[in-house]
Amino acid sequence: MSIDPLSLLLVAGKSFLLVLATLLPILNPAATAPIFLGLTEGASDDTRRLLARRIATNMVVLITGAMLVGSYVLDLFGISLPIVRVAGGSLIAANAWRLLAVGPSTRDSRQALADAFTPEMARTHAFYPLTFPISCGPGSLAAAITIGVTLHEDQLAPSLARIAGGFGGLVVIGCVLFVAFRYATQLLKPLGETGTTVFLRLSAFILLCLGVQIVWDGISELVRGL
């Protein structure tokens, strides 16, 4: 049975818009960009550019994996989505608390950080915690797993079209994430040094609240399941 190419294009377009509309607000690169700055304090502009590119690439790979095989992996190990939320939310809260607990940096401490934050160190930190759970947390992974269930169909061609459209949406989100992280310093520059510090602390507090909320949602689902 032949399938109209226009129908496949429409199917891919719907998946593209679904992924874009669902995951972009959850990932919210503009909100996580200040956290990225706080966690990479002292890094050079070249190092931050390297990190932004690696984080965007890691995010696309991680979300793609979650959409394609996430539900199968959870079933294999007997892990439920509420458990993922509790574990991931705890990681988010821990990193946010670390940002809040950091004291004000002096010129000497900034220089020490700049000397220590080498490109090699950046590569080791690109996935954890900068990609997961800061940029791509349990909420986005849970959403990606849910979307992945809708991408599969009995017929091969429509299923491949849905997957291709969803991957295209992820690539666009990855580009947005790269731009937000790459130019985070310029975006916050109008606030000045004091304003940027205040904004970073507020962002860290909001991230802490988000982590606690994710943990609470996971625990609530586990309790309702008893």
Image (tube, rainbow, N blue to C red):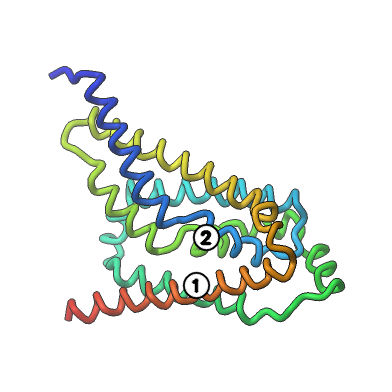
Question: In the image, what residue type sits under mark 1?
Answer: Ile
Q: Earlier in the sequence, mark 2 or mark 1?
A: 2
Q: CA distance from mark 2 to mark 1?
A: 10 Å
Residue 123 x %, y % = 66, 55
State the quadrant of the C terminus.
bottom left
Is 220 above or below relative to 14? below
Residue at the far right: name it: 108
Report if the CB atoms under discs 2 and 1 are less than 8 Å apart. yes
Q: For residue 31, which numbered disc appears in the image?
A: 2
**Residue sitting at 65 percent across and 62 percent down?**
37
Q: For residue 189, which numbered disc appears in the image?
A: none
Residue 130 x %, y % = 57, 61
**Residue sitting at 56 percent across and 79 percent down?**
97
Q: Which residue is mark 1?
A: 206
Is 163 above or below relative to 111? above
Residue 94 x %, y % = 52, 77
**Residue neighbourhood size for the residue with mark 2, other residues' Cα within 10 Å, grouped as few (<14), some (14–19), many (≥20):** some
**Residue sitting at 35 percent across and 37 percent down?**
16
Query: Would residue 51 appear left or right of 2 to someone viewing this image?
Result: right
Residue at the far front: name it: 190
Question: In the image, what residue type sits under mark 2?
Answer: Ala
**Residue neighbourhood size for the residue with mark 1, other residues' Cα within 10 Å, grouped as few (<14), some (14–19), many (≥20):** some
**On the image, which quarter does residue 143 sit in?**
bottom left
Query: Would residue 179 appear left or right of 196 to someone viewing this image?
Result: left
**Element at label 2:** helix
For the residue pair 141 and 79, the one nearer the viewer reads as: 141
**Element at label 1:** helix
